[in-house]
Image (cartoon, grey):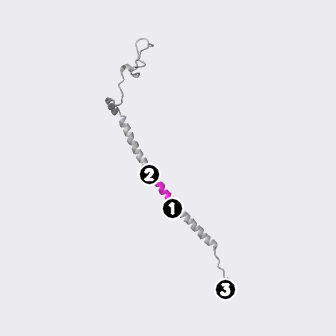
Amino acid sequence: MNRNRRNITHSIKVASIFKVVVSTAILAGAGLSYVYLKNQLQQYGEIQRRLEHELTEIRTASEAVRVQITQLSSRAVLEKKLAKNSLGLVPIASDQIVRLNQRHDGIGDELKVVSNRGFNQ
């Protein structure tokens, strides 16, 4: 019996071991890819959530500024500022107004003297 044991060779099935190793490597790669892609998806979701929050804040601030511009440029507010003389504006004197295309009785090509007193002071 001793003799029979010496002649017995144990063969290793390399092909089946190789198939198991390759299939395990493919499954491991697929699992790691899945986890990596899920992490990327979560990171991009956080970035999108943060950007949407910033966009909402910017829209709110923009709306507030638009309302303020509308209020400050309304006729009533401008008239109040003009009444307080806080704009630095003065009423236009009638001698500083030049009217074009007026109908006159007489010659149409006559020259008129115009005063520019307020501009050269």
Q: Which residue is mark 3?
A: 4
* Side (left or right) of 36 relative to 15: left
Q: Quadrant of residue 95?
A: top left
**Residue 54 image position (x, y, % from top left):** 43, 48
Residue 33 shown in magenta = yes
How packed mark 1 is, by other alpha carbons closer than 10 Å (few <14, some 14-19, many 20 or more), is few
Name the residue rendered at 46%, 52% in the picture.
48
Side of 86 where 20 appears, left or right = right
Q: Amino acid at mark 1?
A: Val
Q: Residues within 10 Å of mark 3 (few under 14, many from 20)?
A: few
- Is the residue 57 above or below the residue 20 in the image? above
Q: Is residue 80 left or right of residue 102?
A: left
Q: Secondary structure at mark 1?
A: helix
Identify the element where label 3 is drawn: helix
Q: What residue span does the magenta drawing correspond to?
A: 32-45
Which kind of residue does numbered mark 3 sit on? Asn
Residue 35: mark: 1
> Marks 2 and 1: in contact by CB < 8 Å?
no
Q: Where residue 110 sits in the image (x, y, percent)?
A: 44, 13
- Residue that badge 2 annotates: 50
- Which mark is first along the chain, 3 or 2? 3
- Which amino acid, by three-letter code, is at mark 2? Arg
Q: Residue, x 40% and y 47% (percent of image)?
A: 57
Camera-side residue of 83 and 31: 83
Please tell me how crowded label 2 is: few (under 14), some (14-19), or many (20+) other residues with Cα within 10 Å. Answer: few
